[in-house]
Image: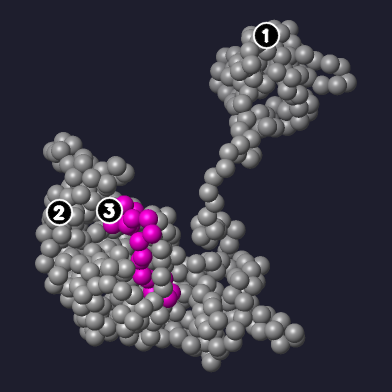
């Protein structure tokens, strides 16, 4: 125990230093910080820690003994004594045991969040660089809202439904950038995408319902569906997206509850569904009567000029629910996730959202003003310009460092590359080898089966220097694995 954490010497006080120690030691004993029988460190150790003369510590301990708060045993040590202690089975300090005395569920998937402090270099699976848009610039909007009493008073009215002005601005922005035709009545938003997925599963999924996902998909979203009792079935993919004919040939009408997909810049492979495949999927959803959940998580980051039409816009039957992000290139506190669906669905979904009570009305007002004043377009253009440069530079470095040992395509959007190794190696061993060199290779970046050995590596949060360093470490780890295989 560090005594300097609760004993503070103030040389400006009129009380002698040894009495300051006495008073604070008594408080520590009374509060239970120092328990009955606790052995106090020697006077030399305490004097060194508190940066005072040893004789001052000795005087304090003797005073504590005189008052009955200490027992000093020559050649043994000084021990805490509490004259105010009452005999009770509840008395004394309480320390939580290291092991819980009850059972609980454990998750293998959640183990993929490592302690990032132990790594000097890091790869992500596709994260923005929050250094680009300065936080103090965004804080200017937030601070301006806080100064307006009218806005703060009015915010009390929106505590349950959220900021209506923001919803109007957000729906306007979505219509402008995606070509949708929605109103504020078609949208709910929250800071956390998993909350929206949880709401969807609570409203849609019954135990045993079949949910179809792509052969490679987002583990964390899948986990939410599984926890709701859904049975996940994977659908194979080709260059045009998931194989719609596979669904028709292997499932009957009424067997499928919903299909969860990323048609734009699919997670993790970064590929896009063809317009033909999207149209076929929409038609099958109407014929087989299942719901389409379209996740447009990466659609804010487009580097191509050709406009890709979301499933949501193709579907005229109202069977598609759209999940999207707004301001993902802003700092985390200013981002939001949204869900778009018919009005009656949103009305019911809002009831679930109210349970979480995580609406930051001041932030929503600030975001609404960022949109209405046009600053959001400036921020987006700035971020996209930098990300496009980094994407191209990352592709150059991949080619330079790895050459023909890998296959990849430059993504048309999103913030990550899908990289396939031509040689079959253990990605788990590769991850451990990178760790030895202080490079974080996230567990959820690894994708391996009989046919595929691939990584999803983010580029947007890395400078050119960081990219080069990370890729060189990765190449060194890769070569070590190849050498090990050849030796065997």
Q: Would residue 38 be found to the left or right of residue 128 on screen?
A: right
Quadrant of the frame with the N terminus: top right
Q: Would residue 241 be found to the left or right of residue 147 on screen?
A: right
Percent x, y for residue 269? 41, 78
Q: Label 1 belongs to which residue?
A: 83
Assess whether mark 2 and mark 3 are in contact (beta carbons under 8 angstroms).
no
Percent x, y for residue 74? 86, 17
The magenta stretch is: 197-217
Q: Would residue 94 be found to the left or right of residue 263 on screen?
A: right
Q: From mark 3 to mark 2, how far is it between C-alphas? A: 12 Å
Task: Count residues near mark 2 (Cα–Cα under 10 Å), then give few for <14, some for 14-19, many for 20+.
Answer: few
Assess whether mark 1 and mark 3 are in contact (beta carbons under 8 angstroms).
no
Task: Count residues near mark 1 (Cα–Cα under 10 Å), then give few for <14, some for 14-19, many for 20+.
Answer: few
Q: Is residue 209 magenta?
A: yes
Residue at the image position 11 percent from the left and 59 percent from the top: 183
Q: Label 3 belongs to which residue?
A: 203
Q: In which image quadrant can residue 242 be found?
A: bottom left
Residue at the bottom extreme, as displayed: 404
Label 3: which secondary element: helix
Q: Label 2 belongs to which residue?
A: 344
Task: From the viewer's side, name the closer residue of 488 and 388.
Answer: 488
Q: Is residue 369 above or below residue 426?
A: above
Mark 3 or mark 1, whichever is nearer to me: 3
Which of disc 1 and disc 3 is earlier in sequence? 1
Percent x, y for residue 86? 63, 9
Q: Is residue 281 above or below residue 81?
A: below
Residue at the image position 54 percent from the left and 45 percent from the top: 104
């Amino acid at each position: 125990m560090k005594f300097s954490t609760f004993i503070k010497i103030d040389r400006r006080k009129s009380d002698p230093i040894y009495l300051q120690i006495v008073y604070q030691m008594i408080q520590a004993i009374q509060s239970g910080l120092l328990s009955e029988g606790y052995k106090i460190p020697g006077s030399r150790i305490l004097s060194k820690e508190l940066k005072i003369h040893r004789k001052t510590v000795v005087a304090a301990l003797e005073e504590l003994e005189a008052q009955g708060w200490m027992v000093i045993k020559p050649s043994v040590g000084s021990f805490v004594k509490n004259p105010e202690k009452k005999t009770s089975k509840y008395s004394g300090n309480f320390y939580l045991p290291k092991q819980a005395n009850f059972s609980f569920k454990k998750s293998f998937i959640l183990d993929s969040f490592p302690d990032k402090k132990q790594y000097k270099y890091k790869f992500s699976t596709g994260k923005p660089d929050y250094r680009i848009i300065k936080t103090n610039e965004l804080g200017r909007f937030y601070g301006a809202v806080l100064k307006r009493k009218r806005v703060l008073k009015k915010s009390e009215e929106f505590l349950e439904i959220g900021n209506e002005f923001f919803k109007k601005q957000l729906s306007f922005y979505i219509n402008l950038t995606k070509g949708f035709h929605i109103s504020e009545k078609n949208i709910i938003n929250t800071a956390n995408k998993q909350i929206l997925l949880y709401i969807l599963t609570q409203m849609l999924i019954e135990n045993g319902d079949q949910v179809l996902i792509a052969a490679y998909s987002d583990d964390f979203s899948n986990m939410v569906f599984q926890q709701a009792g859904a049975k996940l079935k994977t659908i194979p993919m080709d260059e045009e997206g998931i194989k719609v004919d596979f669904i028709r040939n292997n499932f009957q009408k009424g067997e499928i509850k919903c299909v969860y997909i990323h048609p734009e810049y699919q997670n993790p492979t970064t590929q896009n569904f063809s317009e033909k495949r999207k149209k076929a999927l929409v038609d099958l959803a109407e014929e087989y009567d299942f719901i389409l959940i379209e996740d447009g998580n990466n659609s804010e980051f487009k580097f191509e000029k050709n406009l890709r039409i979301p499933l949501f816009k193709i579907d005229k039957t109202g069977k598609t629910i759209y999940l999207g992000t707004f301001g993902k290139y802003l700092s985390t506190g200013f981002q939001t996730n949204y869900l778009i669906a018919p009005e009656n669905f949103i009305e019911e979904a809002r009831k679930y959202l109210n349970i979480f009570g995580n609406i930051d009305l001041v932030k929503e007002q600030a975001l609404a003003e960022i949109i209405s004043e046009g600053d959001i377009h400036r921020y987006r253009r700035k971020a996209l310009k930098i990300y496009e440069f980094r994407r191209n530079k990352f592709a150059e470095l991949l080619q330079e460092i790895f050459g023909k040992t890998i296959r990849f395509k430059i993504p048309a959007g999103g913030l990550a590359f899908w990289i396939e190794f031509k040689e079959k190696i253990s990605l788990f061993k590769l991850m451990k080898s990178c760790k030895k060199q202080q490079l974080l290779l996230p567990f959820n970046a690894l994708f391996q089966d009989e046919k595929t050995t691939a990584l999803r590596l983010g580029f947007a949060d890395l400078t050119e220097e960081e990219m080069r360093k990370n890729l060189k470490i990765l190449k060194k780890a890769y070569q070590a694995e190849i050498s090990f295989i050849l030796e065997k």
